[in-house]
Amino acid sequence: MPSATPVPPIAAVRPYEVESPHGTRTDEYYWLRDDSRSKPEVIAHLEAENAYKAAMTAHIKPLEDRLYEEIVARVKQDDATVPYRKRGHWYYVRFETGKEYPVYARKAGSLEAPEQLMLDGNALAAGHDFFEIGALAVAPDDRLLAYLEDTVGRRQFTLRIKDLATGETLPDRIENVDPYLAWTADGASILYVEKHPETLLGYRVRRHVLGTDPAEDALVYEQDDGSFYTSVRTSKDERYILIHARSTVATEYRYAEAADPALAFRLFLPRERDHEYYVDHFDGRWIIRSNWQAPNFRLMEATVGEEGDRANWRELIAHRDDAFLHGFDVFRDFLAVEERSGALRKIRIRPWGGGSEFFISADEPAYTTMLGQNAEIDTHVVRYNYQSLTTPETVYDYDIETGERQLMKRMPVLGDFDPANYRSEFLWAPARDGTRVPVTLVYRAGFERDGTAPLLQYGYGSYGYAMDPWFSISRLSLLDRGFVFAIAHVRGGQEMGRRWYEQGKLLHKRNTFTDFIDVTRFLVAEKYADPGRVTAMGGSAGGLLMGAVVNMAPQDYRAIVAQVPFVDVVTTMLDESIPLTTNEFDEWGNPKQKAFYDYMLSYSPYDNVAAQDYPAMLVTTGLWDSQVQYWEPAKWVARLRARGTGSAPLLYRTTMEAGHGGKSGRFQRYREIAEEYAFILDQSGVAE
């Protein structure tokens, strides 16, 4: 007899009043929130959802397994990064065949020297379901290594110190740390950022003297504004330690000489709303990237000690309306600048000696270039990374004196991969308000624009984060099965400069969602896609995009994949005890203010679930997620089950041993991708 159709879990309805200054809202699934992540009834519900998802996808499990094997077969398992030089050592990361985690190593003097093992992630991960190295910092004497490890997935790192000469891990151990580190010049102490125990925001910078009790670590700086993130690092020339406070709309730096025993920090320039600046030091002067009277940023310089008055700042690169100054790196003879124009990220070289500026050229219509690992100042070679939707990640060294470009490495793709078998395009899609939205897409050669192809459309559109075209070794499994893959560069990102970001945040947030829908309709109208086989995917704030789109235009999508989705916007933003609430007010708005409350309520996916037919949906999360708490998608799925109509599958999977980024091992991550792709192929009618 055929097996019975699996029955989805139905969450109990327990009305709870969520209070606000503007009235109350009833949340019938609020009980699914468990900060301890230990309540039996909550865990049982999540496990029941996992079991239901497994039962509903049992028929495509063989496809998932084939996809996983197919993806892993393309991976060069014993791979390594291109070594970079710093203080006479060559540093690199390598992977070993069949193992999940990286090995960090170096060689002294030359690449022919014997390898010195710094950290073996596989050995450190033994016995843990989750493992991640958050940051590493080698002391100025090159003997000690500070590193941060997370064995839960909550991004609450533990600071450890290793003696690289003896291989001994020192007894110093500091819990609940953010992934930022800075050594003092003598290597006797290290600065780190302590997380708030409740909100998990990094808010205190402390100084740990090696060999002392961490409970006695001196407080160097404390952040008193919950809307700011805090980090610490050294300047590239290692002369200064920098404390950086950053909110959505303002920044502030403090600096101290790394060799000063007292570490007397000075304020660089006081924070000021709507002024963001970023600094590095070189040759007695500060190089400053600033949006002061320059929405798309400009580059300035100031002599050390005179930075506190902007009247002393001198302009190096002027503001442009048509180009966004993304970042910079300092060298002895030149500046390397990341600039975004025409929605693409480029690298400009500006010699200090007054020679002509120039761009490093690219050969494709849609690509991404970004500065790579450039640890040393005294060099005429700049390392940068290049990739596109058809070109694997490539590392180049560019000699600014000779103009020669040296290929250092191209990510190997095993099997029969040939970039010539794929095509990419850069398009402009009209949004409903007349704005032109950039779209990059890729497909296999031989594709015909006849309206029959399945489409996977990806988007993000928040925090000014630009979703640059990137190569994916796993995506080939979709392209080789006839898929078109498209990135919708919607407003809320920064692909088109600061204004693009401003038009997709706060009281303009709905532009992000309508742009995505309009891109879908454009691609269908232009016959890049079969209207009955369109899938959309997004994660985190991109999961919010998925949730909003599926409420606003469910008929436009056959399937949706929402990864760690931020879907309960109003309730979360009302709760200042949750990580990433107070410092997100300038991104989403403060719901204690009625205008923001009403606007957020108008698009919040959880609050707008309706009695309508929804497409097939796969929703994923991690129990220990500190960025988007697991209960947001759990409640959303429960409400979708209760209110939604239609017969399309609604599947929800919680990884019980992971956080925001999913499982930690590289092969485990490919398993999650195979799971998503099997679902997409099945819903698109391409399952084998």
Image: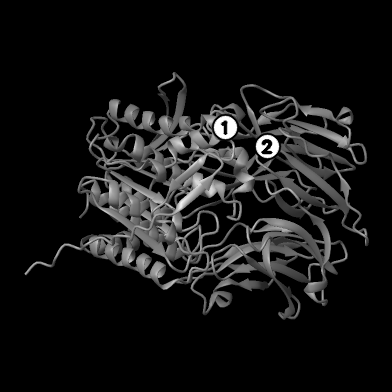
Reading the image, the residue beneath label 1 is 501
**Front tag of 1 and 2:** 2
Does 96 sit left or right of 319 as displayed? Answer: left
Q: Please, what secondary structure does the residue beneath circle 2 have? A: loop
The image quadrant that residue 208 belongs to is bottom right
Q: Residue at x 78, y 48 (%)?
A: 377
Does 440 sit left or right of 313 as displayed? Answer: left
Q: Position of residue 495 (x, y in %)?
A: 55, 33
Q: Position of residue 121 (x, y in %)?
A: 58, 71
Kind of residue indicated by mark 2: Val
Q: Residue at x 87, y 57 (%)?
A: 258
Q: Nearer the viewer, residue 632 or 322?
A: 632
Q: 10 Å neighbourhood of mark 1: few (<14), some, or many (≥20)?
A: many
- On the rendered image, what quadrant is the N terminus found in? bottom left
Q: Position of residue 59 (x, y in %)?
A: 20, 62
Does 183 sit left or right of 306 as displayed? Answer: left
Q: Please, what secondary structure does the residue beneath circle 1 have? A: helix
Q: Nearer the viewer, residue 524 or 84?
A: 524
Q: CA distance from mark 1 to mark 2?
A: 12 Å
Query: How is the protein colored in the picture?
Result: one colour
Q: Nearer the viewer, residue 127 or 369?
A: 127
Residue 265 vertical placement versus 318 (above, below): below
Instruction: Pick whichever of labels 1 and 2 is earlier in the sequence.
Output: 2
The image quadrant that residue 109 belongs to is bottom right
Residue 322 vertical placement versus 111 (above, below): above
Reading the image, the residue beneath label 2 is 249
